[in-house]
Image (spheres, helix red, strand yellow):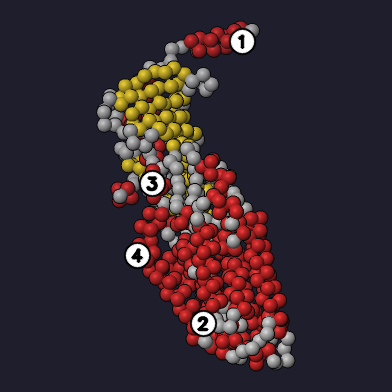
């Protein structure tokens, strides 16, 4: 009985504990990402864009501090969405003092801490970044970035073996797609009765690219020539 | 069988038969040279609409032997019927023009058998021509450009399939193209039965193909609903249906065809047209008063 009382009391007190200071939380998240100087990762890239039907492609992802990132096709054909170089938030977070942090509380459903980062640099490509952070694990699980040139995109990350480095096992990158259309005189399409029905579904949709990483090689060095 | 051999021998003895093979080889090689040196630019231009959504178009990966073959067939399968008409349109009218048709008809062979053999020889020529296209467009392109996944550009979609999911599609596409070209051969053959010289059926067949192809490609709703579904040229594009895939959440279903029943329907319509053209040819030839 006494033990139960203490557990309940601890839970109640725990829930009343003040949330972490936003700057501290960002610093902790950033500290994890800072452990990584470079990495090479193998991955499977799944494209879910309304006007593309493609098999899952094999890719290799290269990263080098502070902001070099490249996704290379290993086998098959894959399309890399605009803004996807920002799937690594290390560079943005490392620019300490170059953004204002606004605490937006917690997300009701997941309990994730919401922090809005507003860059002070007027020339920054990212205009607003909203981060959904797991305070306990000190990991960013979701990010919504509004950019100057590439619209708004969202990142959803799930972690596994490389959580200590803040590196996800899976990233889902959602972005706005523009309409795709080729002149019929070029394609000489065969009307199989399906294409026309799909026409309305092909407009103004969000695209998704999902990268599932299979293995990371962290801090083993990456040649600069790869990023050229 | 010996009659068929004689008819095939007649076709392949004529120098003009080889014009078609030479023209096809020339066009295919010209396209291959162009794509070898400017192919990536061509692919980039073709898919420039995607540039707004994606970092860069992987033109290097998209340009490979399979795509080159698709581009060649896309350009060529509209023109090959014209080359088929050169031989099929000459099959009976050529004999009449040379004055040998009467001699042939006087042999102890029924008119039906004579016509069957002549049409089979035209169909054989058509198939050999198609095999020639396949060898140059597919196998030479593979040798020159290598293989990778095939990306098929459509008006509103881009369909990608894995390398090991492509060859069977080409096999069926060539079989379908054979049905379409034999249909054209039947049209030219039917006109040939009505004519006394070969220029007429060849020119009329070519004109019919040009007019029907224009109507097929025109995007006018009135024609889309009324005339287009009945034109054999509309259904001749059915070979492409083998490269239209189904997808689940954007991922290509391996081995899938978007609408197989539509392709079968198109093949059925082409076979139907062939039967009608041949039926008219046989009906008329049996009653024809052969004077030359």
Q: Which of marks 4 and 2 precedes in the sequence?
A: 2
Label 1 sits on residue: A4
Q: Position of residue A202 (x, y in %)?
A: 51, 42
Residue under pointer 4 = B37
* Chain letter of the residue beneath label 3 in the structure image: B
Q: Are marks 1 and 2 in contact (CB under 8 Å)?
A: no
Question: Which callout, 1 or 3, points to the residue nearer the camera?
Answer: 3
Task: Please check whether the numbered discs 3 and 4 fall on a single chain.
Answer: yes
Q: Which residue is mark 3?
A: B51
Q: Taking the image as drawn, is residue B195 in sight?
A: yes
CB atoms at circles 3 and 4 under 8 Å apart? no
Relative vertical location of residue A76 with respect to residue B126 in this rendering, above or below: above
Question: Quadrant of the rendered structure where residue A118 is?
Answer: top left
Mark-to-mark CA distance, 2 and 4: 32 Å
Q: Earlier in the sequence, mark 2 or mark 3?
A: 2
Residue at mark 2: B17
> Residue B53, relative to residue A107: is it above or below?
below
């Amino acid at each position: 009985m006494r033990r139960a009382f203490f557990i309940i009391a601890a839970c109640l007190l725990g829930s009343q504990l003040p949330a972490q200071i936003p700057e501290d939380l960002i610093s902790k998240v950033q500290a994890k990402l800072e452990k990584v100087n470079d990495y090479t990762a193998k991955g499977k890239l799944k494209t879910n864009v309304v006007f593309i039907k493609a098999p899952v492609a094999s890719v290799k992802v290269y990263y080098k501090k502070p902001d070099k990132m490249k996704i290379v096709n290993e086998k098959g054909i894959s399309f890399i969405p605009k803004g996807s170089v920002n799937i690594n938030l290390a560079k943005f977070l490392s620019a300490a003092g170059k953004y204002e942090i606004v605490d937006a509380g917690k997300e009701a459903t997941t309990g994730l801490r919401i922090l809005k980062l507003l860059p002070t640099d007027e020339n920054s490509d990212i205009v607003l970044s909203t981060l959904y952070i797991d305070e306990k694990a000190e990991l960013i699980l979701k990010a919504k970035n509004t950019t100057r040139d590439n619209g708004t995109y969202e990142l959803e990350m799930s972690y596994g073996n490389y959580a200590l480095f803040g590196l996800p096992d899976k990233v889902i990158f959602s972005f706005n797609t523009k309409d795709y259309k080729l002149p019929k005189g070029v394609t000489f399409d065969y009307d199989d009765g399906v294409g026309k029905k799909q026409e309305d579904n092909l407009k103004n949709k969000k695209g998704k690219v999902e990268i599932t990483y299979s293995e990371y090689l962290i801090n083993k060095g990456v040649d600069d020539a790869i990023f050229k | 069988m010996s009659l068929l051999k004689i008819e095939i021998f007649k076709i392949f003895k004529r120098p003009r038969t080889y014009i078609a093979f030479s023209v096809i080889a020339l066009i295919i090689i010209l396209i291959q040279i162009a794509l070898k040196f400017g192919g990536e630019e061509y692919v980039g231009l073709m898919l420039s609409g995607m540039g707004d959504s994606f970092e860069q178009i992987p033109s290097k990966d998209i340009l490979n032997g399979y795509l080159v073959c698709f581009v060649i067939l896309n350009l060529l399968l509209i023109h090959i019927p014209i080359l088929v008409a050169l031989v099929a349109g000459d099959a009976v009218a050529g004999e009449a023009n040379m004055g040998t048709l009467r001699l042939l008809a006087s042999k102890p062979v029924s008119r039906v058998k004579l016509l069957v053999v002549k049409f089979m020889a035209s169909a054989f020529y058509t198939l050999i021509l198609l095999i020639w296209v396949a060898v140059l467009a597919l196998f030479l392109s593979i040798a020159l450009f290598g293989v990778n996944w095939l990306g098929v550009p459509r008006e509103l979609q881009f369909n990608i399939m894995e390398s090991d999911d492509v060859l069977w599609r080409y096999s069926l596409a060539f079989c379908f193209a054979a049905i379409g070209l034999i249909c054209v051969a039947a049209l030219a053959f039917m006109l040939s039965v009505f004519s006394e010289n070969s220029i007429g059926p060849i020119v009329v067949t070519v004109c019919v193909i040009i007019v029907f192809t224009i109507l097929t490609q025109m995007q006018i709703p009135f024609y889309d609903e009324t005339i287009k579904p009945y034109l054999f040229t509309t259904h001749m594009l059915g070979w492409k249906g083998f490269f239209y895939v189904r997808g689940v959440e954007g991922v290509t279903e391996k081995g899938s065809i978007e609408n197989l029943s539509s392709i079968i329907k198109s093949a059925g319509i082409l076979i139907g047209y062939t039967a009608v053209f041949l039926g008219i040819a046989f009906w008329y030839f049996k009653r024809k008063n052969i004077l030359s």
